[in-house]
Amino acid sequence: MATRKPFTDRGKLFPRRRSALLAACVATGILTAVSACGGSGTATTTKDGFAQAPQKDGAFTVWVDSTRLAAAKLYQKQHPDVEMKIVTYDGNANGSNYLQTKVQLFNRTGKGWPDVVFSSQNNEATWAVDADFVAPLNKGLVPESTLSGFAKGANDVCTVDGTLYCLRNDLSQAVLWYNAPLMKKWGYKLPTTWEEYQKLGEKVAARHPGYLVGDAGDSYTPEVYLWASKCGANDITGPKSVSVNTTSANCTRMAELMDVLIKKKSMSISGVFSTDFGKNKADKVLMMPGPAWYGGALFKGTFKTPAKQIAAAPMPQWSGETSPSTGNVGGGTWLLSKHSEHLKAATDFLTWVTTDSAYQGDMSPGFPAYAPAAETWLRQQNASGYYAGDISVLKDASTQVWPQWGSGQFSQEAIWAATVKPGMTQGKTIVSLLPAWQDSIVKYAKSNGYKVSQ
């Protein structure tokens, strides 16, 4: 999985605070840090690369979104002797920043941090390290034999200055989902290029009005289409630097394609999880570029699409491109709090939920980031009888995610939702909105301390 790692440097961001804190701790002349040195106001012991809070008996707390609730409940069922408190929250969906806001509160009050937390976002390490929230995982807590099992590049978004601060849940590489019986019935050939995809979308609009070849109504739309087109809107180039160019040829070519199909009405702007889409369009999907989790979570779970209809194909590529590229939508990460007073239990859960096939291989709606579980997951999916064909194309796509779309501290989903989506609903073209998208990204990036090149 070629995913850009979040370039963050705590020392460069807060050199004075860190230096003063270090001096104060050194001045104590002791190995056990207290108060400001440990940040918790109680004695701590340095182990596994960080100052650990005193450990206690009792329940550890895990925060999950509604989709990962099943994982937490399964662990609790399989480990009845482990005390565990499960809390559901929005999972930071669409870049809500709920987790970051709560951590800031917990840091001020000195209590309340969850032991383990799931986030649907891949950029949490960019702030959670500086917020002194996450524990390093590759300094002794999680053995290398386990970490080496993750797909290549899967945990890059969790790595800061060589230290691993979270574990990837699943890979969300985009592929082309399609209704196999309808494609065959209507005599359509799967498009292998974006040019063919556009022509097919125009044919569908003319011959089968109401049917769709895609959707552009979700906040993660740019991660499906613009990312796959190698649009340089979000290239994290250094610890706190980003390159933003939303009006390049790679961006405009995809925007123009989408504008044509939106105008022809074979591409929706409703959003696949909207009430309108579910009621009026869910059974009208001929093709749908989207992430790996669309198969289980969207078509099977939300749309209730019958078995033997949905299949997966590689994402189309632009004519003349020599290296296949696709985008990535979420995937999510699991973080372990360095404030945890139940590290053994919390680490055991963190390891289980990201690697054990009881969840990742058998139950996960998405393509697991842990390679052995991914193999099990693919076998299970292909043997389930739900899909119209083998979906092992997901494995190939996991190595084709374009690496120059980064995981910065700011949320591209939130920016698109605030800047581009309102204009689209007003009838404006995506091409016409690209400059506004550029300005908005620059503003968000600078407000988060990034140096921006355009």
Image (cartoon, rainbow, N blue to C red):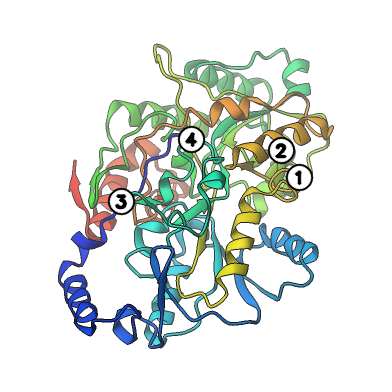
- Which residue, given by chain and number where applicable, does mark 2 sit on? 377
Instruction: Establish if 99 lies above or below 119.
Output: below
Mark 2 or mark 4: whose residue is earlier in sequence: 4
Q: Of helix, strand and loop, which one carries label 2?
A: helix
**Residue 134 placement: quadrant:** bottom left
Q: Is residue 410 left or right of residue 333?
A: left
Task: From the image, state whether disc 2 or disc 3 is nearer to you.
Answer: 3
Task: From the image, state whether disc 1 or disc 4 is nearer to you.
Answer: 4
The residue shown at (58%, 23%) is: 314
185 and 380: which is toward the camera: 380
Categorize mark 1 by other alpha carbons within 10 Å: few (<14), some (14-19), many (20+).
some
Mark 1 or mark 4: whose residue is earlier in sequence: 4
Task: From the image, state whether disc 3 or disc 1 is nearer to you.
Answer: 3
Q: Where residue 345 sits in the image (x, y, percent)?
A: 62, 68
Look at the numbered discs 3 and 4 and tell me whether their residues touch, using CB distance below 8 Å: no
Instruction: Establish if 201 lies above or below 109.
Output: above
- Which residue, given by chain and number where applicable, does mark 4 sit on? 152
Give the position of the C terminus as an image quadrant.
Answer: top left
- Which residue, given by chain and number where applicable, does mark 3 sit on? 161
Amino acid type of disc 4? Lys
Q: Of helix, strand and loop, which one carries label 4?
A: loop
Amino acid type of disc 2? Trp
Look at the numbered discs 2 and 4 and tell me whether their residues touch, using CB distance below 8 Å: no
Q: Of helix, strand and loop, which one carries label 3?
A: loop
Amino acid type of disc 1? Asp
Instruction: Establish if 446 lies above or below 302.
Output: below
Mark 2 or mark 3: whose residue is earlier in sequence: 3
- Which residue, given by chain and number where applicable, does mark 1 sit on? 362
